Image (tube, helix red, strand yellow):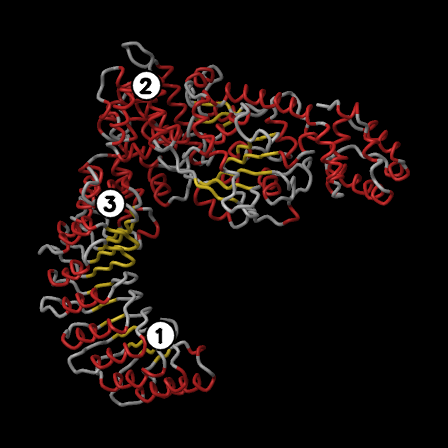
Amino acid sequence: MASPFFADFGLMWYLQELKKKEFMRFKELFKQETSQLGLRQIPWAEVKRASREELASLLLEHYEEQQAWDVTFRVFQRMDRQDLCERATRESTGHSKMYQAHVREKFCSILVKEAIPAIHKSYDENIIQDELQYVESLFTPKTPGKVVHTVLLRGKQGSGKTHLLTKLMLAWSRGHLYLDRFFYIFYFCCQELKHLPVTSLAELISSTWPDASAPVSQILAHPEKILFLVDGLEQLGCDLSEPESELCQGWGEARPPRLLLSSLLKRKMVPECCLLITVTMEFGLELEARLADPEVRMLMGFGNRDIQECLYRVFQDLQQATEAFCIIQQNAQILELCRLPVPCWLVSTVLKLEMDRGADMAHACSRSTPLYASFLFHLFTPRMPEGPSWQGQAQLHSLCSLAVQGMWANCMVFGEQDLRRNGIADSDLPALLELRILLRCRGPEPRYKFLHSSIQEFCAALFYLLKSPGHHPHPAVAGTQDLLLTFLDKSRTHWVFLGCFLFGLLHERERQRLDTFFGFQLSNEVKQQLYQCLKVLGQTKDLHKKVHLLALFYCLFEMQDEAFVRQAMALLQELTFPISSRTDLEVSAHCLKHCSNLRQLSLSMKLVLTRGEKGQGSESDSDLLHWYQVCSVLTTNGHLHTLRVKDSTLSEPAFAVLFNQLSQPNCILENLLMTNVNFHCESWRLFEVLMHNPNLKHLNLSNTRLGHEDVKWLRDMLNHPTCHVNKLVLMQCSITEEGCRDLAAALTTNGNLRNLQLSGNLLKDTGVKLLCGALAQPSCHMEYLGLEDCGLTGACCGDLATVLTSSRTLILLNLIDNRLGHHGVVLLCEGLRHPDCNLHLLGLRRTMFRPETQALLLDEEERNPNLIITDDW
């Protein structure tokens, strides 16, 4: 759109402001800019000899008025003539504001028509208004004085990143947001871009422009007023690792979408623009380090207030919405699902349908699979007593075929050929779009996607009960066992719900609903195929390194089949998994209580059981009940010999639950490893386990702070006649010289200890001297002593040498990262040469010593063929 500005104020007026040398530089830069912008070239000979008036005429002769100004403006910027840029901006402000209002109005019309009804029709400006403060803050720097040009918005898949960008665009188009900061906002969906072989920035801008043709040169003349929204960058695999030579410099150059966006993000193209990039949590970590000074934000999804707002907009009745919210709150899994905007609307819609027909909302809200099944069956079932029509059955069947193709081919956007290949005829499309199960993507080519990725995953799971994967027209679609293995090892990061839906559909009630809807009995082979797959997994070595066990727990929980869960858990002997939410705790409890052959259990508990104090309410009671079910595996399983709890925080009630199970006579635990665990309780309760559990042989409390009183309690418990611990690991426990006195007292009376690891504690020479006095006693049978990085010097080496000569059992001594000096090593070598020394492995870092000390150690190692001196401990 040409500006009338130049009709009143000619180019010549601005060119006359340039001095002679500046005018010559203007011509040289003008040649570069026209090439970069892809404009027709004016013969250089004409440009070179042109006067200011002649050059202005040439510009208006070869280019439209707006193009002429755009290139002139860019050259002024490169010449650092901001005074001319600012003057022109001021003089054209009135026109710009009217034009921007026109553009925003057009964008608003399209967004309201295409994007907003995709969620629900009651979505309006009020929700936008509620979130304006958060959206506005995205470009507000955390550090005062910093100007934010790049925002990296990280969030889980389905957490509402696209939803938020839609709200941002609608707020801007209505004049509520970024009114003066951004003249233009462009949205690029990476799911759609990856289907393009090559494109240019100009073509992308034109494809999202509300009018027939976009004034690209005018838009890019003010790059600092442009905001590009890049949604789902992980879909393109764009990690900014491409060599500079592959990137494009000009907005008219065509490149594969991945290279085009890399050029934009690495500021090789339109460097003055602003960027808002959305990515998944995992991909964001890799990308953050490669972006130039990004402002990183996290999108956590809906809060309780947002969920209540969504419910009210669907129910249109405050009392009913409140009742529905109370039901959702009682189910941690459904509450977590409602943190995602579109699933929250889906849950609200289903609950409203159940309420309208007088059904039990709590039953429909028991798990995610019944909710999605109810939603889809309602869409494809006409309101008539005879049930679904054959058209509805066929359409849902075809959608399932399309969905599973997309999951295996990592494709969320489909062309018309994809639809036809999977049985969706042109005549079906209007109905599916009307139901909003499919949405039409913006762009010149007709492309479509599911309303939400979770709905696509549900349809994909349903496919496996409807038809054999071998009958699918797309070769990428694999069988049931491959699906489970792929889901569990998370090789497909966009698979969030698929495995759970597959298990959930095998529930007897869901099977009956499916049989009724489709009019025939669905396949009975899937459950047996899943069990055979789990049987193979149970025989896999280092299972936890290859399988996301918590994902398996979620699958089994969704199935709600006690007999199958019991069979499946009986196959597993070693479990390692984190518990990071109340839902994780609930599904873990559901599965662990059915273990019968478990040998080793390792878990972490982060910020889940930190409550549980008096007055906290029933929610905490529910958490403790689930924690009890997890801990009960210690007494109900006759094979469990190792428990590791790491990186965890336990409240006093939570620890009491664990302690009670550890202290039961039928707990046969031999190894208890509690590393980096914060206990909100008195330490004596922990050490009392040593007295109540005579089977315990190995205790590891590394990275758990132990004060002087704690070490005293530990000493008393170690000296108790029922304590049989022979391996004690207290690495980095903040033990001091004073604590060594109590440990030394335990060593003189406890004849069971064979392995003591104290590395990472500031014991100093005086503390080790106390320990050595006990280690040299005949009643001490220590075999391994770990003193790495304990602040030791050569002053303690005489005492250590005495232990080497007096202990008949010590064979391993770790002294790495202590500054022992040459004299200290000499004293150690004297002990090593003693005929009664039985040491086989000595930990020392040779590079910490000067050459003569290193030579001394080498001689000692050559002299004693049974001795190895190493820093590789």
Q: Is residue 359 left or right of residue 18?
A: left
Please state the horizontal and vertical placement of residue 488, each as a whole percent of the image.
34, 43
Q: Is residue 370 above or below residue 386?
A: below
Tell me where residue 700 appears, x and y as whole percent: 24, 63
User: Which label belongs to residue 315?
Assistant: 2
Q: Which residue type does callout 2 highlight?
A: Phe
Residue 565 image label? none
Q: Quadrant of residue 303?
A: top left
Question: Foreground residue, 36 or 836?
Answer: 36
Is residue 646 in view from this perspective? yes
In the foreground, 362 or 177 = 177
User: x and y percent of residue 479 in the render?
Assistant: 36, 37
Q: Quadrant of the C terminus?
A: bottom left
> Does dot 2 land on a helix, a strand or a loop?
helix
Q: Which residue is mark 3?
A: 611
Q: Secondary structure at mark 3?
A: loop
Q: Is residue 471 visible?
A: no
Q: Earlier in the sequence, mark 3 or mark 1?
A: 3
Between marks 3 and 2 in the image, the one whose residue lies nearer the viewer: 3
Amino acid of disc 3: Arg
Q: Going from the N terminus, do you reach mark 2 or mark 1 first?
A: 2
Residue depicted at 79% across the width and 39% down the height: 30
User: How many numbered markers are drawn?
Assistant: 3
Say if mark 3 contacts mark 1, CB within 8 Å.
no
Residue under label 1: 791
Q: CA distance from mark 3 to mark 2?
A: 34 Å
Label 3: few (<14), some (14–19) or many (≥20) C-alpha neighbours in 10 Å: many
The residue under label 1 is which amino acid type? Gly
Label 2 near label 3: C-beta < 8 Å? no
Examine the image and state in which quarter residue 534 appears.
top left
Query: Mark 1 and mark 2 in contact (Cβ < 8 Å)?
Result: no
